[in-house]
Image: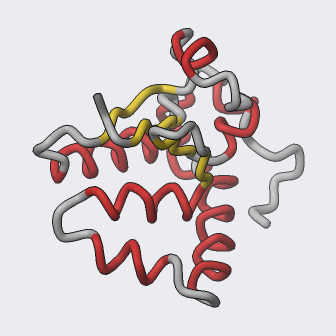
Amino acid sequence: MSELTVLYDGQCSLCRASVSRAQRFDADRRIEFLDVRDPVVTSRFPQVESEIALRSMQAVDGRGRVWNGVEAWARIGMLLPGWNMTAWVLMLPGVRQVGAKIYNWVARNRYRWNREACADGSCSLHLPKDSSAK
């Protein structure tokens, strides 16, 4: 059984690449990665709102606590060899707030950088209505 389950947007190439990178460090399989669109997510994690999970990666620990965005990355880092220091730095006051702002900006704009993966128009659901990258 995994210590942490990470829910990510499987239609996002940036998200898939991030998951792949983390999996390479997770030799002990301490983390389970699931596409938030997988039907099993709703039954296993009723506390997770898929609408929110599509906007921000989430991590669910063994107690059912849900961590979002940069805090989820910190939880991931605590379980991966060589990532512990990064995880602790992300949780420092000030760094945490700046990290959250950066994470949220990247999350909001992630489909803009991968338009070729969205040629079928599916990503337009995730792009903001106005065309400026806020």
Q: Quadrant of residue 101?
A: bottom right
At 56% from the left edge and 9% from the top edge, which residue is drawn? Answer: 39
At 60% from the left edge and 24% from the top edge, which residue is drawn? Answer: 45
Compared across the picture, whether 105 is left or right of 8 comes to right
Compared across the picture, whether 31 is left or right of 104 comes to left
Q: List x then y, in percent, for residue 81.
A: 17, 63
Q: Is residue 66 above or below residue 95?
A: above
Compared across the picture, whether 18 is left or right of 7 comes to left
Compared across the picture, whether 28 is left or right of 2 comes to left
Q: Quadrant of residue 87?
A: bottom left
Q: Quadrant of residue 121?
A: top right
Q: Residue furthest right?
A: 130
Q: List x then y, in percent, for residue 118.
A: 56, 30
Q: Residue furthest left?
A: 27
Q: List x then y, in percent, for residue 94.
A: 63, 90
Is 5 or 36 nearer to us in this picture?
Answer: 5
On-image quarter of the C terminus: bottom right
Q: Residue furthest front?
A: 63
At 43% from the left edge and 83% from the top edge, which residue is drawn? Answer: 89
Q: Is residue 120 above or below residue 54?
A: above
What colouring method underlies this structural image? secondary structure
At 54% from the left edge and 34% from the top edge, which residue is drawn? Answer: 9
On-image quarter of the N terminus: top left
Q: How many marks?
A: 0
Is 99 or 72 nearer to us in this picture?
Answer: 72
Q: List x then y, in percent, for residue 22.
A: 27, 50
